[in-house]
Image (spheres, rainbow, N blue to C red):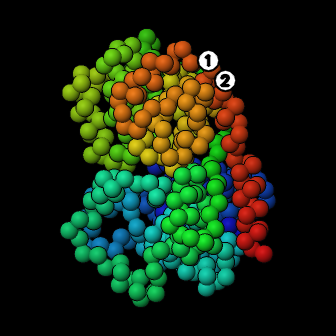
């Protein structure tokens, strides 16, 4: 069986949750004897073919159909929110001899892929990774800001190819990451088949800490509050600065690619204003297989995920697997596997007082959180998830 995984972008230098899901599923499918390939635009990377661990990644040229499109705005859309048109990608799919299209994107990529799949009688599955049903209005406005005052000509292209951008309504199956998202999709698309399909993690043994603290100038007497996620308005890292002033024995460590430069600058400005900038470290460039990611988990006092919304929350599961006590916002898919006071401490969305209360309880609950969190993490492994996905593929292909 040959599977075409279709994703908006896929770069090992700009790693996010969607990339992690696609890659781990592909690795497991290859281990099953299947043939997964990744088809994506060259956003944040370069056009060409790359083979990594036996998996072929094909990156294609693309445009955002707006005029003008300066480099600054194109980069912002590459990082988040872009709706590209990639004709060479669709041509490659046409001749890929794929058995199934698994689409990990929305908008134009999904719509054209499904149109092609219908013509070729290939089943089309959509995984909704970005929490499309839960994006707040303010965040949506920020995502679309690069398109302001531009002439849109994408509609002309869509009409020429007779493609309507409503991919969720015509996909053969929708995969939802959370119970909340599944319910919203079923309400929005009555009669559409929607399956609950959570993400997983790959267990990795933690290495010795080595000189991690020294390299990043983090004092040995400070407790590290760790957050590994994209530096972005959605992830809400600025809220974590509120923990530093009442707890002078702490140091905030943020690791992840910067997908919203303006928000990154806001974090730095807020830290300066609060007088805690010397207790903030941001590491934006670590690759997903970096040993330093594991060293950061090894040395962390706790992991905090303060997201405004979260489709699933792989980072939270990885923290549980690493036996790092977890504090998280009670939002989205996190509520499906986190229980307050059992495997995590939960706080109200974007509420600094509630966050501080949760942190103040941490020392008392620490051992229980670690023990119960480890059990939770063991229930989400990529091997069993990929096996279930293959069963779904075979069912759709009958």
Task: Please say if the residues under marks 1 and 2 sit with CB atoms less than 8 Å apart.
Answer: yes
Q: CA distance from mark 1 to mark 2?
A: 6 Å
Q: Is residue 386 above or below residue 358?
A: below
Which quarter of the image is occupied by the N terminus?
bottom right
Where does the image place residue 289, in percent across and percent down from the top left? Answer: 58, 40
Q: Is residue 59 above or below residue 208?
A: below
Q: Which residue is mark 2?
A: 371
Which quarter of the image is occupied by the C terminus?
bottom right
Between residue 346 and residue 95, name the one nearer to us: 346
Q: Which residue is mark 1?
A: 367
User: Which element carries disc 2, helix, strand or loop?
Assistant: helix
Q: Is residue 69 above or below residue 250?
A: below
Identified at 47% across, 78% down, the residue is 87
Q: Is residue 61 visible?
A: no
Query: Is 129 situated left or right of 255 in this image?
Result: right
Asked where in the image residue 379 lies, by quadrant, the reply is: top right
Identified at 71% across, 59% down, the residue is 389
User: Which element carries disc 1, helix, strand or loop?
Assistant: helix
Identified at 27% across, 61% down, the residue is 146
Where does the image place residue 169, in percent across and percent down from the top left? Answer: 53, 73
Where does the image place residue 254, in percent across and percent down from the top left? Answer: 41, 33
Q: Is residue 216 above or below residue 266?
A: above
Query: Is 168 situated left or right of 143 in this image?
Result: right
Where does the image place residue 102, in percent across and percent down from the top left? Answer: 62, 66
């Amino acid at each position: 069986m040959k599977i075409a995984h279709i994703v908006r972008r896929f770069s090992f230098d700009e790693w996010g949750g969607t990339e992690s899901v696609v890659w781990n599923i592909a690795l497991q499918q290859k281990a099953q004897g299947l043939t997964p390939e990744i088809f994506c635009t060259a956003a944040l990377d370069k056009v060409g073919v790359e083979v990594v661990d036996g998996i072929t990644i094909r990156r294609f040229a693309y445009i955002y159909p707006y005029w003008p499109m300066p480099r600054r705005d194109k980069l912002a859309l590459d990082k988040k929110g872009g709706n590209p048109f990639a004709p060479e990608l669709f041509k490659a799919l046409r001749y890929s001899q794929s058995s199934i299209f698994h689409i990990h994107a929305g908008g134009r990529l999904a719509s054209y892929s499904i149109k092609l799949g219908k013509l070729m009688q290939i089943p089309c599955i959509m995984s909704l990774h970005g929490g499309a049903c839960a994006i707040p209005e303010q965040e949506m406005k920020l995502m679309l800001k690069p398109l302001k005052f531009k002439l849109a000509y994408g509609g002309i292209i869509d009409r020429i190819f007779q493609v309507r951008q409503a991919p969720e309504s015509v996909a053969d199956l929708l995969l939802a990451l959370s119970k909340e998202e599944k319910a919203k999709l079923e309400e929005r698309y009555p009669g559409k088949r929607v399956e609950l399909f959570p993400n997983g993690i790959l267990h990795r043994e933690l290495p010795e800490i080595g000189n991690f603290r020294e390299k990043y100038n983090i004092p040995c007497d400070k407790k590290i509050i760790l957050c590994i996620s994209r530096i972005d308005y959605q992830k809400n890292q600025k809220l974590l600065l509120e923990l530093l002033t009442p707890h002078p024995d702490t140091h905030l460590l943020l690791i992840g690619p910067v997908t919203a430069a303006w928000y990154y600058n806001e974090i730095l400005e807020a830290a300066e204003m609060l007088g805690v900038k010397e207790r903030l470290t941001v590491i934006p460039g670590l690759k997903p297989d970096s040993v330093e990611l594991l060293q950061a988990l090894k040395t962390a006092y706790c992991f905090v995920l303060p997201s405004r919304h979260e489709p699933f929350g792989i980072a939270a599961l990885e923290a549980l697997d690493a036996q790092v006590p977890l504090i998280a916002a009670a939002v989205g898919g996190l509520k499906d596997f986190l229980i307050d006071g059992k495997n995590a401490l939960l706080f109200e969305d974007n509420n600094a007082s509630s966050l501080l209360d949760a942190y103040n309880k941490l020392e008392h609950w620490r051992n229980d959180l670690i023990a119960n969190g480890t059990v939770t993490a063991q229930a989400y492994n990529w091997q069993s998830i990929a096996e279930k996905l293959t069963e779904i593929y075979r069912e759709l292909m009958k």
